[in-house]
Image (spheres, rainbow, N blue to C red):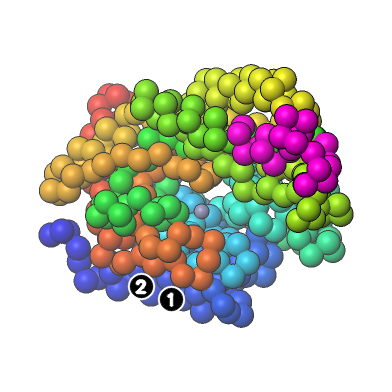
């Protein structure tokens, strides 16, 4: 790409290295949500931002906002953001890349803030669920949507709660409990987030940057039990068996076939049973399995597709119960809504990429992001993915700085294009 400048790559590397250096003992990065690693990352980012001439502000919920000091406009800004926390022993780029990208875009408008729409860079806290079992803490609080019950969620170590950590970080717990929003939907023109891809698609396809179509929601049962009848593996004939393993195996292979057909129909869907076990207290090589416990998760960008696949699942359970004499018991269902990304911004990303000579493919995000919280609050939100090898949530994340700069180029171009549109609408 012709827009790759040495300066951008150097600044990016400096920011990534400076934050990595304060991200705890290895392997990998540990920037605990509302903990020390995240505090240190935020301090490093704020110090370099000040050096770059940005005006910095920490809001009442301890998120960091950056802007150009000569930007005195009051119109709702375009916000470029992501999170600074990581999972324990995670990678350096998950989250941090979005904050660094925003800083690079902002740096391009130094001394000429009015050449872009009003811009803010937002470094959020507490996106990862790994520490308190709750994701998007920072963005939910910002929008007044963090449930008060979340404050009682225990730290992964078993000692202390999220409320304790928020208090230690200096947040006003009463404001959080009351659901006081610092940002309302009309306050922000758009929320844009650049993030590393966390799956293998872009590397496999050779795509450096993509636009995200939507963020998959999910529908889960953490535990489903299939209850059959234990028996002697040699003594019970096939026709008298109630084998729980064969019943669940049949259920999953029927659902796998439905999945294949729905994909052929063009639907977005993934299905996973990540936990699958016979009863360890009674299972044995010579015992027909009387019980299987398994997890069941469906994800899609489309709520109706998830519901349809869920209905099919329950139908197949009833049919297998009748045919095999087993019984399925479902624990409570947990729903997370999908989030559509803003079509206008997806279009701007495409046009911006075209201007710099890059074909821009589109893919869904299977993982959750703060952008979903903004989108579901009614704020136009959009995301770019940058190619990354070895997935994320591990120390082996591998993003090339050249790919990252290409992503920043698309983001900056799209923001500049957005400027003309927003100036026109204001006139
Ligand atoms: Zn992330």
* Label 1: how many Cα within 10 Å (few below 14, some 14–19, many 20+): few
Report if residue 262 lies within the magenta region.
no
Residue 100 visible in image = no
x, y (%) of residue 404?
A: 31, 60
Name the element at disc 2: helix
Figure quadrant of the C terminus: top left
Question: Exactly how many numbered labels are in the figure?
Answer: 2
Magenta stretch, residue numbers: 229-251
In depth, the one of 24 and 286 nearer the eye is 286
- Taking the spot 56% from the left edge, 53% from the top edge, the residue there is 124
Mark 1 and mark 2 in contact (Cβ < 8 Å)?
A: yes
- Taking the spot 39% from the left edge, 67% from the top edge, the residue there is 398
- Taking the spot 35% from the left edge, 40% from the top edge, the residue there is 363
In the picture of the structure, the residue carrying the numbered disc 1 is 17
Q: Is residue 246 above or below residue 104?
A: above
Which label belongs to residue 13? 2
Q: Is residue 64 left or right of residue 330?
A: left
- Taking the spot 15% from the left edge, 58% from the top edge, the residue there is 1
In depth, the one of 40 and 305 nearer the eye is 305
Report if residue 236 lies within the magenta region.
yes
């Amino acid at each position: 790409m012709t827009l790759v400048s040495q300066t951008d790559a150097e600044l990016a590397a400096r920011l990534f290295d400076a934050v990595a250096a304060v991200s705890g003992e290895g392997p990998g990065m540990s920037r605990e949500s509302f903990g020390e690693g995240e505090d240190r990352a935020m301090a490093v980012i704020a110090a370099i931002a000040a050096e770059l001439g940005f005006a910095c502000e920490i809001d009442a919920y301890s998120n960091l906002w950056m802007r150009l000091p000569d930007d005195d406009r009051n119109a709702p800004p375009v916000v470029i953001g992501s999170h600074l926390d990581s999972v324990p022993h995670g990678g350096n780029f998950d989250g941090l890349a979005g904050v660094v990208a925003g800083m690079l875009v902002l740096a391009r408008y130094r001394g000429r803030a009015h050449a872009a729409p009003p811009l803010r860079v937002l470094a959020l806290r507490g996106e990862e669920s790994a520490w308190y079992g709750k994701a998007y803490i920072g963005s939910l609080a910002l929008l007044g949507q963090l449930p008060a019950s979340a404050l009682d969620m225990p730290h992964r170590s078993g000692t202390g709660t999220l409320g304790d950590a928020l208090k230690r970080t200096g947040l006003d717990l009463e404001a959080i409990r009351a659901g006081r929003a610092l940002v309302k939907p009309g306050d922000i023109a758009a929320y844009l987030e650049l993030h590393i891809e966390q799956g293998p698609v872009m590397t496999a396809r050779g795509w450096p940057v993509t636009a995200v179509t939507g963020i998959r929601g999910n529908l889960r049962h953490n535990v489903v039990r299939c209850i059959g009848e234990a028996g002697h593996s040699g003594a019970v004939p096939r026709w008298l068996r109630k084998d729980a393993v064969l019943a669940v195996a049949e259920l999953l292979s029927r659902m796998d076939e439905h999945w294949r057909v729905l994909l052929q129909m063009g639907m977005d869907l993934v299905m996973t049973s990540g936990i699958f076990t016979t009863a360890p207290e009674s299972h044995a090589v010579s015992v027909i399995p009387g019980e299987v416990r398994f997890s069941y998760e469906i994800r899609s960008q489309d709520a109706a597709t998830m519901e349809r696949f869920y209905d099919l699942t329950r139908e197949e359970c009833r049919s297998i119960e009748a045919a095999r004499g087993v019984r399925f018991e479902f624990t409570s269902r947990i729903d997370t809504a999908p989030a559509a990304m803003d079509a206008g911004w997806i279009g701007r990303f495409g046009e911006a990429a075209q201007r710099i000579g890059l074909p821009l493919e589109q893919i869904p995000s299977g993982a959750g992001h703060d952008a979903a919280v903004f989108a579901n609050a009614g704020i136009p939100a959009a995301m770019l993915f940058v190619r990354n090898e070895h997935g994320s949530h591990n120390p082996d994340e591998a993003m090339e700085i050249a790919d990252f700069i290409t992503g920043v180029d698309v983001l900056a171009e799209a923001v500049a294009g957005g400027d003309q549109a927003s100036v026109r609408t204001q006139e």
